[in-house]
Amino acid sequence: MTLLEFTIATARKAGKMIEKAGRKTIKIEEKSANDFVTETDRKVEDLIIKEIKKNFPDHAILGEETGESADLKDAEYIWIIDPIDGTNNFIRNLPFHAVSIAVFQRKISKSSKNFEYIEGEIVVGVVHSPALGKIYSAQKGKGAKLNGKPITVSPRNKVYRSILSTGFHGDYKAFNLPYFEAIIHKSQGIRRFGSAALDLCHVAEGKIEGYWEFGLKPWDIAAGALIVEEAGGRVTDTNGNTLDLFGKDLLATNKRIHKETVEIFGKIQ
Ligand code: IPD
Ligand code: CA
Ligand code: CA
């Protein structure tokens, strides 16, 4: 079984657990103001970690609910997990929630114990929405797929003819409003799906032309960013600079509207 096949199989197991839990009453906890976690988020992350540790005992993990594993300093591979991206949707039985799993491969020559400064690249990304019956996957240099079939980004090349999505995370709600306003006037429309991982996959699949957000975390975007790039899209920060998984912002597009979107953002005071 390849790394990609293993990741897909694990995401499938996680998806089954999410589906089953969604049919029962869900125990919810408020982590911080309006930031919720359910017992399912935790159980799903535990399941994924158990599978990884069983099959790849030398690999390290960065999980949303459990943080960094102790072996992160030396591992060549680091798994980045969001057990449920779109927890608010999951709680309300809205279909836009997904499990997101990415595999980061470190450049062995560079050593750092802090993941933020480790050099390397995402080599595998899988986003699985059990409610939508969709498994998006990508392997570095091998293209992106939806349920096993290749996908590519949208051919539209003007923001005026494009739909973009965004999100309003925690501290960045007010900060994002001028961006929202600029795009709403210049584009065909804006969507708010409530799952960063699926926002990215919608760009990869060509359903929308772009997505941006502030305040994201590595587990929200690691898998989806690779899927967009492998589908022919572009992922940077909102200034058009190289994406930093630990940075504050992200812009993903079908590549064709990237420059124009960055220019629109650049005019915001
Ligand atoms: C959130 C979702 C949401 C985005 C937030 C994320 P969570 O993840 O991706 O769409 O706007 O920034 O934190 O908390 O549901 O895993
Ligand atoms: Ca998330
Ligand atoms: Ca989550």
Image: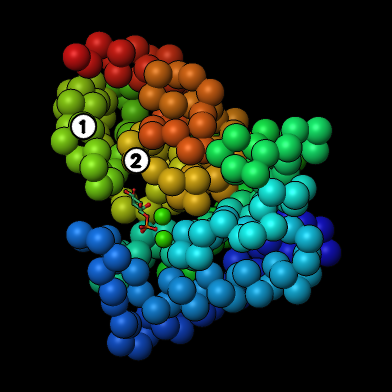
Which residue is under mark 2? Answer: 215
Residue 140 falls left or right of residue 44: right
Q: Residue at x 57, y 48 (%)?
A: 223
Q: Is residue 121 above or below residue 256?
A: below
Residue found at the far bottom of this picture? 24
Q: Amino acid at mark 2?
A: Gly
Q: Secondary structure at mark 2?
A: loop
Which residue is under mark 1? Answer: 175
Q: Which mark is residue 12?
A: none
Q: Quadrant of the C terminus?
A: top left
Badge count: 2
Q: Which sits earlier in the primary sequence, circle 1 or circle 2?
A: 1
**Residue 100 location, x and y as percent?**
53, 57
Specify few, some or many for label 2: CA neighbours under 10 Å numbering under 14, 14-19, or 20 or more: some
**Residue 15 location, x and y as percent?**
53, 72
- Between residue 194 and residue 77, name the one nearer to us: 77
Q: Residue at x 35, y 74 (%)?
A: 38
Residue 53 falls left or right of residue 213: right
Residue 229 occupies quadrant? top right
Q: CB of residue at label 2: within 8 Å of ligand 1?
A: yes
Q: Residue at x 31, y 53 (%)?
A: 194
Specify few, some or many for label 1: CA neighbours under 10 Å numbering under 14, 14-19, or 20 or more: few
Residue 9 occupies quadrant? bottom right
Disc 1 and disc 2 in contact, CB within 8 angstroms: no
- Between residue 145 and residue 69, name the one nearer to us: 69
- Between residue 67 and residue 175, name the one nearer to us: 67
